[in-house]
Image: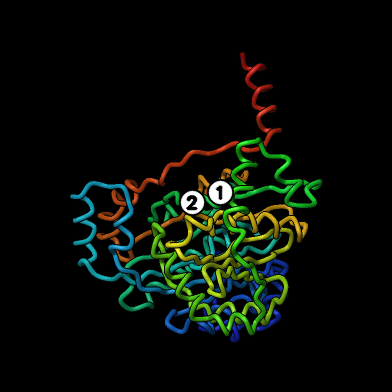
Amino acid sequence: MDNLKASFYSSVDDIDSDHWDSLGCTSNIYYTPEFLRAFERANSDIDFKYIIIFKEEEAVAFANTQIVTIGIETITKNVKMSDRLKRNINRLFCNNQIRVLFCGNVFLSGEYGTFLKAGEDKIETFNAITKAVRDLSKATKKLNAIFVKDFREDSLYITDNLKTFDYASMHVEPNMIINLKNDWNSFDDFKEALKSKYRVKANKADKSSASLIARHFNEEDIQTYKDELQLLYENTIANANFNAQILNLNTYSNLKKTYQDKFIVIGYFLENTLVGFLSAMINQTNLDAHFIGLNYGLNKQYAIYPRILNDYVRLGIEHQCDRINLGRTASEIKSTLGAKPEELTCYIRHKRSFPNQLMKPFITNIQIKSYRQHQPFKVENKVQKKEAIKAS
């Protein structure tokens, strides 16, 4: 590990283009300087820091971090724990706001915070990132906690090494993934694969939302409706179990300008009033749902959210994607469209050792909200019956 050295950058513009070439990470949009710059420039209230690990002069690993301020009640209010433990946690953080160093993109759900170059020792380079994050936390004043996010199961043999640095692991709500079939050339093809009652639900969503006019937004539209988009987005995250930071939707103008058709924003209008929107990024062969916004007062009557989910499927098929990442939250309704959970693990520790030991029982008491996983596809039902017969 002595041959691995960390360099720290306060802006993505300070990172030499040769380093990106050396890492070989930019085939994934989320590891491009253009994508990171879009967030950095629009969210000036966040302290962005970037870490590159070098082996001699060669860049071999990258980490994206942000320092944000969160109200402690935002964390504890939706966590299943005893009232006594909740009071103790609030007291531990003085019933106040806490500053958290996030390693990972705080605005994305998924493994988009660290990148390890192919061919390098993954555990060694990840441990170098961990030490660099530790050094960054020591240099950051008034910092309370470090949160490293979000890792799939096949990465845990690498990331569980964080436990040797006194991190506690925790499961978070999974990403909900729809794998698309090659012979689904239209939404009708997709619906034909559904069992009857789920096909009825999808049709009902479209019928109830028939009064809505869907419009693909260009860069000018995003600017024109920026205030309405921001209001609808903040209305939605206010209903979320947990949200670390509010995104400034000027970010969307930056993303649209850079990525054009790969970054999608659709606005939903009712009598010329914007009542909802979706956003998505086409990343390689994936369609990734980003933030949405909706008017909850009109949602039940006009099925805005179910329509948004239907349209994510339409977009994935239209762009010939292999899979759709619908993100976290509302797992059950997403599963009615065939989405399955992709489990994610995060790691957290307090900056100081003694409070960290006090915090660990809180981490172990966190429970993910349970939900019913639907099996909406006809072929799945047949496979399950065959497996049941074999088992009997």
Can you say which quadrant of the picture contains the N terminus?
bottom right
- Could you say which disc has been placed on residue 334 in the image? 1
Look at the picture and state if 217 lies above or below 306: below
Q: Residue at x 46, y 69 (%)?
A: 133
Label 2–label 1 contact, CB within 8 A: yes
List x then y, in percent, for residue 4: 58, 69
User: What's the mark number on residue 123?
Assistant: none
Image x and y of residue 5, in percent: 56, 73
How many marks are shown on the rendered structure? 2
Please tell me which residue lies in front, 380 or 4: 380
- Three-letter residue code for mark 2: Ala
Q: Residues within 10 Å of mark 2 (few under 14, many from 20)?
A: few
For the point 58% across and 73% down, the residue is 52
Q: Nearer the viewer, residue 144 or 237?
A: 237
Which residue is at the front of the view, 306 or 91?
306
Residue 342 drawn at (x, y percent): 57, 48
SS at mark 2 in the image: loop
> Left or right of 149: which side holds 339?
right
Residue 192 lies left or right of residue 165; in this view the side is right
Name, please, the residue furthest toward the top: 392
Residue 319 visible in rendering: yes
**Residue shown at 72% from the left, 46% from the top:** 190
Q: In the rendered image of this protein, does residue 190 appear above or below residue 348?
A: above
Give the structural element (helix, strand or loop) at label 1: helix
Q: Mark 2 points at which residue?
A: 330
In the foreground, 95 or 274: 274
- How many angstroms separate mark 2 from mark 1 (CA)? 6 Å
| Residue 118 placement (x, y as % from top left) | 70, 61
Q: Which amino acid does label 1 sit on?
A: Lys
Badge 1 crowding class, 10 Å Cα cut-off, few under 14, some 14 to 19, many 20 or more, is many
